[in-house]
Image (cartoon, helix red, strand yellow):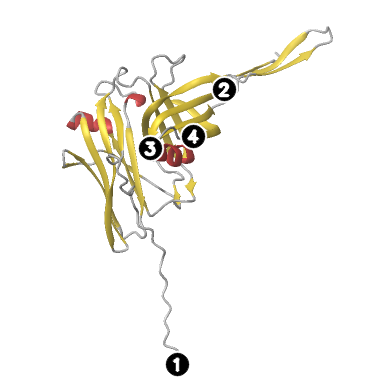
Amino acid sequence: MDYRKKKSFSVVTIPTGIVEEDRGLIECCCSYDVVASLTSNDTWKNDVKGVYLKRSSLSDSVTFVIKKNDVILANLGTVATFPNEPLGIGFIYDWKRYLTAHGVGCYEISKSFTISGVTGGFVEGIFNLSEYSTERLDNTCRIRSEFSSYNVKMDFDFTGSNLIDDLRFEGYFGLRQPNTEVSNLVNTGRKVVKTTREHLNTYELIAEPITNCKSGLLLDMHLLNEDTCYLSDFNKANHSQYLDFSVILNGNVSVEYPGNARIMKLSAQFGDKVVNQKSMYNVI
């Protein structure tokens, strides 16, 4: 007589934060600069922070917690929706609302969960909120990304989601190269006439130096997963101003690891999201 019984169990991945071996360096957990404005609704002056987690079943519980001076505050912002990831849950923190309600200072966002009976949690990051100032932001950039595609490694489908995230870092964006393409014809009178002319602009993003927390978020979240991307540059000496400038990654991403420190230099090439700088001969 066969007394064996077959049971099926789903494979569960328990979320983990960044927990590294202590090697003697004096470092704190991941810290990020965020800004907001009390007088303007311009998007490049008001940051948001998108957080998310994937459950193993709908019965799992996930809580996002924000604190200031160890005091738990209300979650102010927008609930993140994932129409193609039913087990996904998230929230988009609105730093303008925190500046208005609680002022500048140091905020902590953490995740706590009970997944398949396992309870845990970790700190997402420390966020230093200040009021928007061109003086304070000199020599920095911000990338804002919207996510709407499937990530294989995370097994997370952002398709159709409203998730947005901002990341500020020391760096530079610009260095436009027009890469002009010209097409001319020689007519019967041996005169050269224009047919089409087009600028296929490229831009360079330079981030230096950034910590491993920021490099991971920039490389493995924003540059890998973005579907709509906006870059802002706050360098006083930049030839042009770029404020929530719509671009798409279209070239090599390269990194360097200088010296004996846990920092990275990164460069990446972008192009216009909308390619419309073109003129052509028009028969009237």
Asked if one can make out residue 272 in the rendered structure from this viewpoint, the answer is no
**Residue under circle 4?**
255
Give above or below for 25 relative to 271: below
Give above or below for 47 relative to 237: below
Type of residue at label 2?
A: Asn
Residue 185 location in percent, x, y? 77, 15
4 and 2 marks in contact (CB < 8 Å)? no
Quote the CA–CA distance across marks 1 and 3.
Answer: 63 Å
**Residue under circle 1?**
1
Q: What's the mark number on residue 262?
A: 3
What residue sits 49% from the left and 51% below the top? 152
Type of residue at label 1?
A: Met
Type of residue at label 3?
A: Arg
Q: Quadrant of the N terminus?
A: bottom left
Residue 111 location in percent, x, y? 28, 48
Depth check: 255 or 143 in front? Answer: 255
Type of residue at label 4?
A: Val
**Disc 3 vs disc 4: which is toward the camera?**
3
Give above or below for 121 relative to 275: below
**Disc 3 vs disc 2: which is toward the camera?**
3
Q: Earlier in the sequence, mark 2 or mark 1?
A: 1
What residue sits 35% from the left and 57% below the top? 14
Q: Earlier in the sequence, mark 3 or mark 4?
A: 4
**Residue under circle 2?**
201
3 and 2 marks in contact (CB < 8 Å)? no
What residue sits 18% from the left and 31% below the top? 101
Q: Quadrant of the C terminus?
A: top right
2 and 1 marks in contact (CB < 8 Å)? no
